[in-house]
């Protein structure tokens, strides 16, 4: 595979893996709140939801895709503790059930009679099938899921903004909007997922580039793929915040997980709901596939020391995610926010340190 195709596949995969449940919800919510001042919010958002996570990715690539090497400064016990907390939160106890609920938001608008437990069960079964074999993870996401996701998102943004109503003024200063963007960027939890994404991307680069003995080449390819993935993310975030700002009056009283579907319905009519529902589901499925695979590997290898079959670990993990999804979006978000408030700033500092640490160059 040529370097161009490697970078393209890895960059698309990183976009797709980063752009999951929170990324489909919070940019719209940010535009909804800050309306005509959303560009200031976007600047803050890009810092905490794009730049910082990709610093984490590159720090991990620089550590040769090794969790032990990345967290070596914390000691063996500290590294295990932080890994356990991160895997638990981005896995079946937090982000994966959030993916299920965001997907459900679109289908629920299309069919209000659809029970959550049935949708969650079907989503979980598909997720089980995608995670069953982990060795083609980046290719499945980068080659198959990303084009579907990106095509649907681009279509919704383009048409939605073409027919969008005028933005209304909001009583917030530019400083307040910037600060809000920095804060709400935490909610995506992308920095916590960055090392997990980097594991898959590093393995893919090492295999396809055939550069196992050339860390500098792998790092260069990682930088190029990150720039591509980050650029796509920035463009999509701009479009989503603009949609939230323009359609703010139509989103009053709705749950955040229903914003995108409601905007599509307003802009394109009821026939747009199947498009947005499928887009939501594919977007969330790509992220859930990565996170479930990473948590299962951690549970299988690090916690249970391979004494339990991997497929058993996978099935149990998806059952937990299914059960957590039945709690609802608000309860899961409150649970995550209480931890992210103190954990995320510490992880930002550590990610920057690992990228500039000359001892691991």
Image (cartoon, helix red, strand yellow):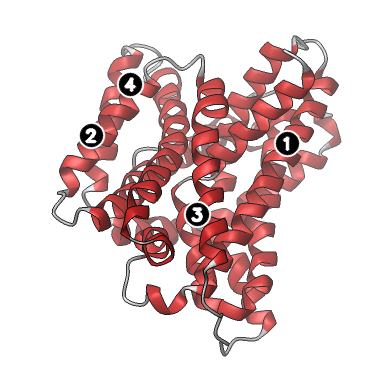
Disc 3 vs disc 1: Cβ atoms closer than 8 Å? no
Distance (Cα) linking label 3 and label 2: 25 Å
Residue 184 appears in the picture as rendered: no
Q: CA distance from mark 2 to mark 4?
A: 11 Å
Q: Position of residue 193 (x, y in %)?
A: 54, 40
Apparent side of residue 169 relative to residue 69 in the rendered image (left or right): left
* Label pair 2/4, CB-CB below 8 angstroms: no
| Residue 58 numbered tag | 1
Tell me which corner region of the image, top left, top right, bottom left or bottom right, holds residue 16.
top right
* Residue picked out by circle 4: 129
Q: What is the secondary structure assignment of the residue under circle 1?
A: helix
Vertically, is 160 above or below 17? below
* Tag shown at residue 122: 2
* Sequence-first tag of 3 and 1: 1
Check the picture and name the quadrant holding the C terminus: top right
> How many neighbours does mark 1 have within 10 angstroms: few (below 14), some (14-19), or many (20 or more)?
many
Q: In the figure, is residue 96 to the left or right of 79?
A: left
Measuring 72% from the left and 39% from the top, which residue is drawn there? 228
Give whichever of discs 3 and 2 has the lower sequence position.
Answer: 2
Label 1 vs label 4: CA separation?
Answer: 30 Å
Query: Eyeballing the image, is 258 above or below 300?
Result: below
Q: Earlier in the sequence, mark 4 or mark 3?
A: 4
Label disc, if present, on residue 156 of the rendered structure: 3
Of marks 2 and 1, which one's residue comes earlier in the chain? 1
Circle 4: element type: helix
Binning the other alpha carbons within 10 Å of mark 3 as few (below 14), some (14 to 19) or many (20 upward) gives many
């Amino acid at each position: 595979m040529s370097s161009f195709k490697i970078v393209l596949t890895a960059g698309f995969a990183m976009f797709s893996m980063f752009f999951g449940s929170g990324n489909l919800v919070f940019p719209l919510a940010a535009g909804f709140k800050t309306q005509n001042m959303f560009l200031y919010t976007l600047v803050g958002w890009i810092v905490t939801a794009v730049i910082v996570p990709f610093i984490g990715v590159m720090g991990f690539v620089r550590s040769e895709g090794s969790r032990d090497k990345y967290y070596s400064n914390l000691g063996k016990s500290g590294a295990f503790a932080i890994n356990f907390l991160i895997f638990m939160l981005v896995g079946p106890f937090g982000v994966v059930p959030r993916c299920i609920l965001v997907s459900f938001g679109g289908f629920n608008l299309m069919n209000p009679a659809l029970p959550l437990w049935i949708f969650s069960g079907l989503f979980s079964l598909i997720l089980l099938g995608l995670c069953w074999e982990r060795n083609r993870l980046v290719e499945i996401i980068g080659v198959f899921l990303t084009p579907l996701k990106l095509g649907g998102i681009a279509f919704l943004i383009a048409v939605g903004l073409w027919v969008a109503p005028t933005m209304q003024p909001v009583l917030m200063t530019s400083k307040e909007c910037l600060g809000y963007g920095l804060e709400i960027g935490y909610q995506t939890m992308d920095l916590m997922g960055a090392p997990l994404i980097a594991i898959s991307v590093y393995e893919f680069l090492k295999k396809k580039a055939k550069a196992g003995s050339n860390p500098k080449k792998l790092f260069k390819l990682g930088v190029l793929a990150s720039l591509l993935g980050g650029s796509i993310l920035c463009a999509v975030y701009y479009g989503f915040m603009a949609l939230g700002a323009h359609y703010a009056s139509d989103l009053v009283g709705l749950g955040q997980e229903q914003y995108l579907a409601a905007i599509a319905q307003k802009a394109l009519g009821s026939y747009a709901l199947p498009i947005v529902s499928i887009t939501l589901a594919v977007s969330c499925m790509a992220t859930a596939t990565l996170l479930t695979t990473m948590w299962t590997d951690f549970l299988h290898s690090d916690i249970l020391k391979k004494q339990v079959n991997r497929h058993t670990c996978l099935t149990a993990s998806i059952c937990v995610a299914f059960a957590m999804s039945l709690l609802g979006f608000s309860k899961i978000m409150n649970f995550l926010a209480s931890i992210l408030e103190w954990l995320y700033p510490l992880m930002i500092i550590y990610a920057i340190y690992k990228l500039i640490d000359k001892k691991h160059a």
